[in-house]
Image (cartoon, grey):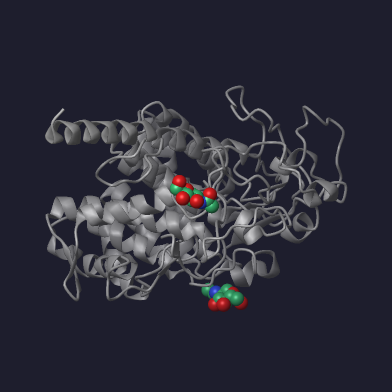
Amino acid sequence: MGLDQRLRLMKMIMIMVCALLGVTQRSMSWQHNYGEALSKSILFFEGQRSGKLPPTQRMTWRKDSAFEDGFQLDDDRFFDKVDLIGGYYDAGDNVKFNFPMAFSTTMLAWSVIEFGKFMGQDLNHALDAIGWATDYLLKSTNIPGVVFAQVGDPHGDHNCWERPEDMDTPRTTFFVSRENPGSEVSAEIAAALAASSIVFRKYHNVEYSERLLQRAIMVFDFADKYRGSYNDSLGSYVCPFYCDFSGYQDELVWGAAWLLKATNLPNYWNYIKQNIHNVKNFGEFGWDSKDAGINVLVSKLLVNNPASKPFTLNADKFICAVLPESPLISVSYSRGGLLFKSGGSNMQHATAYSFLLMVYAGYLNKANKKIDCGGGVFASSRRLKQVAKSQVDYILGNNPLNMSYMVGYGSKFPKRIHHRASSLPSIDQHPNQIDCKGGSSYFETQNPNPNLLLGAIVGGPNINDEYVDSRADFVHSEPTTYINAPLVGVLAYFKSHPY
Ligand SMILES: *[C@@H]1O[C@H](CO)[C@@H](O)[C@H](O)[C@H]1NC(C)=O
Ligand SMILES: *[C@@H]1O[C@H](CO)[C@@H](O)[C@H](O)[C@H]1NC(C)=O
């Protein structure tokens, strides 16, 4: 064999080894099974279900729970008994916090609107996940002039370590009204209903879509007409849990933007134009602040329309605040490459920001432009997707610990997540009730959780890329619905564009 031949042979062997290891020549990064991650990220929502579970329930270690929610309520001024069965538990606890739940629903719906075409068989599961929320949000807004904001007293709930199936903590029901308004929770519910109406219209459930849209319009009117923060109306039941720090102006504009997208009615466009000056935090996006999401959503809605200019300028600023190489960067990255921002449960930022990067990448493509971040840094559609992919890959295992932060994905993942249902034995194994303090030994044990909450993404590592797999360390080990929801869309995209 000549030298040339030998070199060629060696190169071929290298390529084969790389292929076997799942390493591509181009990026030399581990290739993930994004389809599997997508399926699991949606399955997670079944583990968070409250109420009567359907026969199609796949996460079978969970059982029916909280089937009297709303019924304890008796308020002479407004109503007798209300059916508030259903919806999602927020995180590792058993409270139904409608404000972040609605945001998660909006993000699931946006995921399907942008990337549903890449979901394959998981599209139907994603629609189920949205419908599970919207059925409940319809119940929460069934009485004109009232919006239910929360079920479960968080103080009582957090004092116990109980399975949802066993709960004997107060399922106190909280609502806002004309006299005690809550514009943020109401407008976010309107956004969720409007976004979901677009999904169901597109995917052949026109009647349901119309119901969601009519309700969204009604709830938005209520949110706008009776202005105020649920902070003031509900006090220590919502603060410090999901205190509305950023105010309700952003949710009002966000709700109007989703209604504009769902209806195309000029009054929503006028509303947005008249109120956008209240939306100033161009670099923020999450369950509390919707600002960056508004700018990205409106930019995408009005591609190449001069009227979109102020929104696009602010969306560009958002991107330049996120890209690692940008001189205007305002987030941090760990050495291992994970995006960090202040505020608990860091992974929510990595997933929500990645989602916006992906949507805005689509916008840049359509508008055929790049963003000038200064200092010679131009952000292209391709670059935005790269950064989003780096976050997804980190979450799935490309990180200094070589661990996945999604339960049940890969060979090394969090085993002691801060999650009551996952850490206590299933009713199948332990039919007898485990009461409030009866769960303590399951909380304290070093053993792994007995039930896999498949697809749950936890709060994640610290900024030094370290992770202590501890139930007590809830900031890092607790999953939430709003960590997962934005990633559903991002994973769908990479499922069909893995490189
Ligand atoms: C809600 O309460 C928090 C904490 O007290 C406060 O920082 C925030 O400004 C309040 N938000 C509104 C809209 O009043
Ligand atoms: C992670 O994987 C890399 C590459 O295989 C290896 O060099 C490194 O030692 C691993 N780190 C840990 C903490 O397992």
- The location of residue 136, given as percent across then percent down, is 57, 42
Q: Nearer the viewer, residue 295 or 269?
A: 295
- The location of residue 449, given as percent across then percent down, is 71, 41
Quarter of the image with the C terminus in it: top left
Q: Quadrant of residue 291?
A: bottom left
Vertical placement of residue 63 versus 318, above or below: above
Quarter of the image with the N terminus in it: top left
Q: Residue furthest top?
A: 55
Residue in the picture at 26% in, 41% down: 25
Give ligand 1's quarter of the image: bottom right
Specify whether residue 123 is in view. yes
Q: Nearer the viewer, residue 436 or 472?
A: 472
- The location of residue 148, given as percent across then percent down, is 61, 53
Specify whether residue 192 is in view. no
Horizontally, residue 376 falls left or right of residue 190, namely: left
Residue in the picture at 62% in, 61% down: 475
Horizontally, residue 250 falls left or right of residue 170, namely: left
Vertical placement of residue 242 versus 444, above or below: below
Horizontally, residue 127 falls left or right of residue 25, namely: right
Residue in the picture at 37% in, 55% down: 354
What is the tally of numbered marks visible in this picture?
Answer: 0
Residue in the picture at 65% in, 40% down: 50
Horizontally, residue 142 falls left or right of residue 9, namely: right
Q: Nearer the viewer, residue 486 or 383?
A: 383
- The location of residue 478, given as percent across then percent down, is 62, 53
Vertical placement of residue 352 versus 433, above or below: below
